Amino acid sequence: MRDGLWFLMVALLAAGFGCRAEADDTVLPDARDDGAATEDGSGADADADADADADADADVPPAPENTNALCGDRADNDGDGYTDCDDYDCSRNPSVTVCGGGSEDTDALCDDGLDNDGDTYTDCDDYGCSRSPSVTVCGGGSENTDALCSDRLDNDGDTYTDCDDYGCSRNPSVTVCGSTREDNDTACGNGTDDDGDTRTDCRDSDCSSNPCVTVCVHETPAQCGNGTDDDGDGYTDCVDYDCLYHPDAVCPCAAGGECDDASCGNRTDDDGDGYTDCDDFSCSRNGHVTACGAEQTNAQCGNRTDDDGDGYTDCDDFSCSRSLWVTVCCG
């Protein structure tokens, strides 16, 4: 009997401890947390103040960044994420002098680790170096002789081969790339590939995109909204570069394109062609784009100055010689 009572007492005690254990494991709300958020209202007030500040900031338009003062104050004045000379509005603005403006087109200047011309590109990352036939320090070798310009190899590692490389095509000592120009009515209408670039007459952009050539039909700004392929090149209205890049034609930059100041200054390859911002011809040769230190007017193409800092001056620059609206390079 006593044994039975003893077992009963043990069972009751075990049940009591189990209940206490469950009660201890129960997590109760912490009243202090509620009080911290509501007692003095600091949490709600802080959120409200932050929202108000954000709204106030959103209502303030960004300032420009286009003067010597604004380009040297170590502030991102226009809110585009780039400060002072890291911003194209400064580094590629001819009125701003604090961001360099020198040359970068010799072996010494292209191997000193400096952005000598202030265009945000240093040494061989700058076309003034990598595409200059007089610079030998860029790339894995040279591409500047008849032999090297006809071997179907990219000898200097700049992604351009033989006569597609300026080291060949713009080098007076190279003869295999055609000694005759194809940029006049006679050469553009004789059925011959005069300049040896594998493109003949009006199929050659030296003819078709040349305002001095009259035998090739061009699509004029007035024709850029008529729904017709006026020049018969397979492209109609604003799909045709004759329209898209002409400063007098009304052609908006389509989504995903790289053809206005915004898309040509955001350091993004918007159109996915492997070239970014002013390294892309859709920016640098576009009459609507001002962010690339333009060299694409009659005044700029006749002032004996390399206005866009690409190493080529006036009519030696394709921005002039292949522009549909520049006429000073005719003849």
Image (spheres, rainbow, N blue to C red):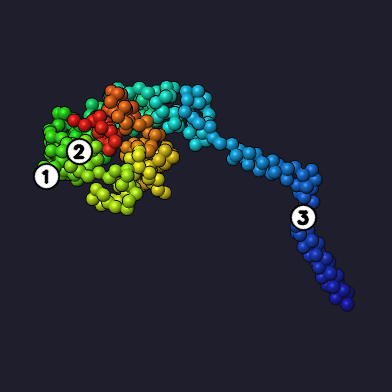
| Relative depth, front residue between 319 and 135 | 319
First reached walking from the N terminus: tag 1 or tag 3: 3
| Relative depth, front residue between 184 and 280 | 184
> Which percent across, then down, holds residue 131?
26, 32
Quick check: marks 1 and 2 in contact, CB under 8 Å?
Answer: no
* Residue type indicated by callout 1: Gly
Q: Quadrant of residue 307?
A: top left
Q: Nearer the viewer, mark 2 or mark 3?
A: 2
> Which percent across, then down, holds residue 209?
24, 40
Q: What is the spatial separation of the Cα atoms under label 2 and label 3, in whole angstroms? A: 85 Å
Location of mark 1 (residue): 191
Location of mark 3 (residue): 29
**Is 92 positioned to the left or the right of 190 in the image?**
right
Res. 225 in view? yes
Location of mark 2 (residue): 213
First reached walking from the N terminus: tag 2 or tag 3: 3
For the point 50% across and 31% down, which residue is it? 64
Q: Nearer the viewer, mark 1 or mark 2?
A: 2
Q: What is the spatial separation of the Cα atoms under label 1 and label 3, in whole angstroms? A: 90 Å
> Which percent across, then down, holds residue 312?
27, 28
> Which percent across, then down, holds residue 124?
31, 31
Q: Nearer the viewer, mark 1 or mark 3?
A: 1
* Residue type indicated by callout 3: Pro
* Residue type indicated by callout 2: Val
Q: What is the spatial separation of the Cα atoms under label 1 and label 2, in whole angstroms? A: 15 Å
